[in-house]
Structure formats: structure tokens, C-alpha cells
């Protein structure tokens, strides 16, 4: 999945300035009461947000999913949800501007710090899932600690969105251990989401390298691993989306990819 052909420099105009936290996403308005003619308050017309989608079982697919069908011209760009919220918003905005939809696997502690981003992800039409509570090496944990990592993030997602999210991805691991796979199923996630293309954006190799890494490995049905907390990813995304379009591939949510 190493360096593909020359794709040109990624669009540098998308790069954000300021410090970016390392890491692996606001929505909801306040409904003000309007005055009625008689001086009484009318009930607000705003409604509570619809609960986010719940996990789904996909019959015939393995417990750990690394890619979707190879006969569809679609791919899933999946983002580890952690880091500077401005970077997250910029990435979501770039995707939406291009008509793309993505999958965000949020870290629970990050949601504690930036709770509005959970609804921002869903309001943009994206998938939102669970990437553990603290983003530690979950495969190395005891059963009790690993389960607490999964359910801790699930509880935060449920509180913020009404759902535990559509997907679970283990932290600091491409695949879940057999124990973590069983614990995720116990927590309500029929599948563990892995990936078959690693952008390596967390190594901060520069935007052109991120684009090349994806281009070298991506094909129909691919699930690509990316992160919110890196400027290189923001800068690379327009070029990545252009390359997908050139190949006739469309970026969709993981749920759409597998449905």
C-alpha cells in the first residue's frame, strides 16, 4: 500500500493553523420561545433530535469487517475521532462539499470535551461509532478493563445521540483480539470494524504522502483508516476525494458500503 503514482500536491488551502492534538467528531440549536399576541409564550417549534442509528447485523459478513463488496464502486473513509475540533469540522466540511459521507469512530474522552461534535457528525449524514473511552491498547487489557473501555464510550454516545453508535473499532489495533471481539458483541456491536487501507496520516508524513498511501491501496469496497487530529489529513482530503472520483469511486458511510 506504499507510494502510488504522482497525484500532485494536495490542496494546501485546507490546512488549518494552530496546534493539533494527536488522536485518532455541533449541532443542536436552542429553541427560543416566541411571544404570542396576548403576551403569552407559545411552545417552541423545535423538536428533540432524532436518535442516531443503532448497530446493525449484516448476515453473511464476518465478525470483524475489513472491507466491503468489491463489485461496488464505493469506499468508506473512516476517521478516528480525536484531536482538535477545528480539524474535525474542517474535514467534515471538505467531505460534505464534495458530496462525500464518512464514518467517525469517536473516542469517549474526546466526546466529553467536545460533546456537540457527536450531533455535528450525524447531522452531516455521516456514521458515528465507538473507538473506546480512552484510546488505550485495548487488546492488552483485562476483560473487565476492556469492557469498561467499550461501554464507557457507548454510554457517552447514548447520552449524546440516543444510540451507542453504528460501529465499534478497537483502539491502538487494526483488529480486535478474540476477547475484545466477544466483549464488543456483548456491548451491542455485532461487528468490529477494521480496515484494509492505512493512510498512515498519524505519522505526519505530509499531505502528498497521505494521498499516495491511500491511492496505492484503495479499490472498490475498501475501508480506509484516517484520523481527525492531523493537519496533513485536512490538506490531503480534497486530493484524495478527487482521486477517488477519477477512478469512479464514491466515498460513502460504512453502513451504506455494506448495505
Image (tube, rainbow, N blue to C red):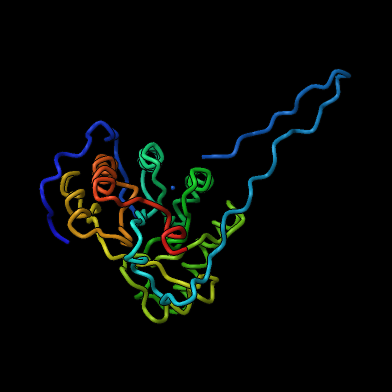
| Number of numbered callouts drawn | 0
Q: Quadrant of residue 27?
A: top right
Q: Where 215 sits versus 144, above or below?
A: above
Front one among 24 and 73: 73
Indicate whether 41 appears above or below 74: above
Left or right position of 5 against 56:
left
- The residue positioned 53% from the left and 43% from the top of the image is 123
**Image point 54% across, 46% down: which residue?**
119
Q: Which one is in front, 95 or 32?
A: 95
- State the residue in front, 71 or 4: 71
Q: Is residue 75 left or right of residue 121?
A: left
Is 76 situated left or right of 13 in this image?
right
Q: Residue at x 20, y 50 (%)?
A: 210
The residue at 39%/36% (across/down) is: 97
Residue lying furthest bottom: 178
Q: Quadrant of residue 135?
A: bottom left
In percent of width and height, residue 49 lies at 64, 45
- The quarter in which the N terminus is drawn is bottom left
Q: Nearer the viewer, residue 97 or 247?
A: 247
What x and y, as percent, mark residue 192? 42, 70
Asked if 68 appears above or below 101 in the picture, the reply is below
View extreme (right): residue: 38
Percent position of residue 140, x then y: 34, 75
Amino acid at each position: 500500500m506504499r507510494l502510488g503514482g504522482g497525484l500532485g500536491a494536495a490542496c494546501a488551502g485546507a490546512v488549518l493553523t494552530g496546534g493539533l492534538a494527536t488522536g485518532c467528531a455541533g449541532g443542536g440549536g436552542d429553541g427560543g420561545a416566541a411571544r404570542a399576541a396576548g403576551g403569552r409564550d407559545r411552545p417552541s417549534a423545535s423538536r428533540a433530535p432524532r436518535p442516531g442509528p443503532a448497530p446493525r447485523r449484516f448476515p453473511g459478513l464476518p465478525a470483524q469487517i475489513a472491507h466491503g463488496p468489491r463489485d461496488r464502486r464505493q469506499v468508506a473513509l473512516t476517521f478516528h475521532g480525536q484531536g482538535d475540533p477545528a480539524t474535525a469540522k474542517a474535514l467534515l466540511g471538505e467531505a460534505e462539499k464534495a458530496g462525500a459521507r464518512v464514518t467517525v469512530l469517536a473516542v469517549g474522552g474526546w466526546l466529553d470535551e467536545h460533546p456537540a461534535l457527536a450531533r455535528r457528525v450525524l447531522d452531516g449524514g455521516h456514521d458515528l461509532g465507538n473507538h473506546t473511552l480512552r484510546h488505550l491498547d485495548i487488546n492488552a487489557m483485562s476483560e473487565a478493563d476492556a469492557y469498561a473501555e467499550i461501554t464507557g464510550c457507548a454510554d457517552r454516545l447514548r447520552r449524546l445521540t440516543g444510540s451507542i453508535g453504528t460501529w465499534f473499532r478497537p483502539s491502538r489495533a487494526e483488529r480486535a483480539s478474540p476477547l475484545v471481539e466477544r466483549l464488543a458483541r456483548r456491548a451491542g456491536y455485532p461487528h468490529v470494524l477494521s480496515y484494509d487501507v492505512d493512510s498512515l496520516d498519524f505519522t505526519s508524513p505530509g499531505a502528498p504522502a497521505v494521498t499516495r498511501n491511500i491511492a496505492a491501496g484503495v479499490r472498490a469496497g475498501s475501508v480506509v483508516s484516517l484520523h481527525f487530529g492531523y493537519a496533513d489529513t485536512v490538506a490531503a482530503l480534497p486530493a484524495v476525494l478527487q482521486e477517488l472520483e477519477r477512478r469512479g469511486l464514491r466515498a460513502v458511510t460504512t453502513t451504506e458500503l455494506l448495505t
